[in-house]
Image (spheres, rainbow, N blue to C red):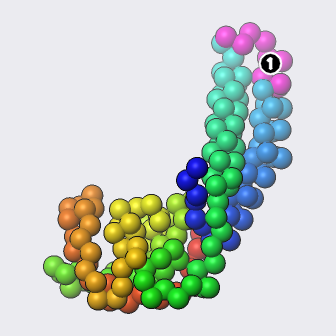
Amino acid sequence: MQKEPMTKYGYEKLSKELEYLKTVARPEVAKEIDRARELGDLKENAEYHAAKEKQAHIERRIAELSDILSRAVVIDPSEHSHKRVSFGSTVYLVDVDTGEGVKYVIVGAPEAKPEKGLISFHSPLAKALLGKEEGDEVEVNLPGGVKVYEIEKICYEPIPFED
């Protein structure tokens, strides 16, 4: 079973979503199905089919969240040294070709928001960075092509999760 690293924030966010789906969304969709059944012929009942589809989506998400949470390993990145790139590290990189600087934070898959610089522990870039030190160069094959970065700085900074 593959462990799923995440912060306390990510764990709590997924736990709240799971609780909501089980206690609010699931009972609501059951009521929608009951109401739609009362409308008669189920073969041509669009409300019934839509509610059943919604129910299937909710059940899939409940199963997915239950699986992720069962494998979760909550890590507090502020407790680690970050001399090498690890989970929760803030990494300042310089594109060797362009000289352009970028900053990424390595987080759990459920917490990733690449557009905000929060990249998944499982992403190709994070995998290339893990274990590296300041001054190291990493070559990574990204969707836009091969990039070479120099690691300028590795540290811990509070992670900006706010949606």
Which residue corresponds to the image point at 68% horizontal and 55% vertical from the top-left? 69
Question: Is 91 in front, or is 101?
Answer: 91
Q: Main secondary structure of the magenta part?
A: loop
Label 1, on which residue? Answer: 37
Q: Position of residue 117 (x, y in %)?
A: 44, 73
Res 158 quadrant in image: bottom right
Residue 148 vertical placement versus 113 (above, below) = below
Mark 1: few, some, or many residues within 10 Å (few <14, many ≥20)? some
Residue 101 is at least partly visible in this image: no
Placement of 119 over or under 46, stated as above or below? below
Query: Residue at horizontal 79%, vertical 45%?
Result: 22
Q: Residue at the location (75% across, 58% down)?
A: 16
Decide: is 53 above or below 133.
Answer: above
Span of residues in magenta: 34-43
| Coordinates of residue 91 in the picture (x, y in percent) | 41, 82
Percent position of residue 108, x then y = 54, 65
Task: Please name the residue shown 83% across and 47% down the image.
Answer: 23
Please state if 42 lies on the left or on the right of 57 as rendered.
Answer: right
Q: Would residue 69 be counted in the magenta stretch?
A: no
In which quarter of the view is residue 62 placed?
top right
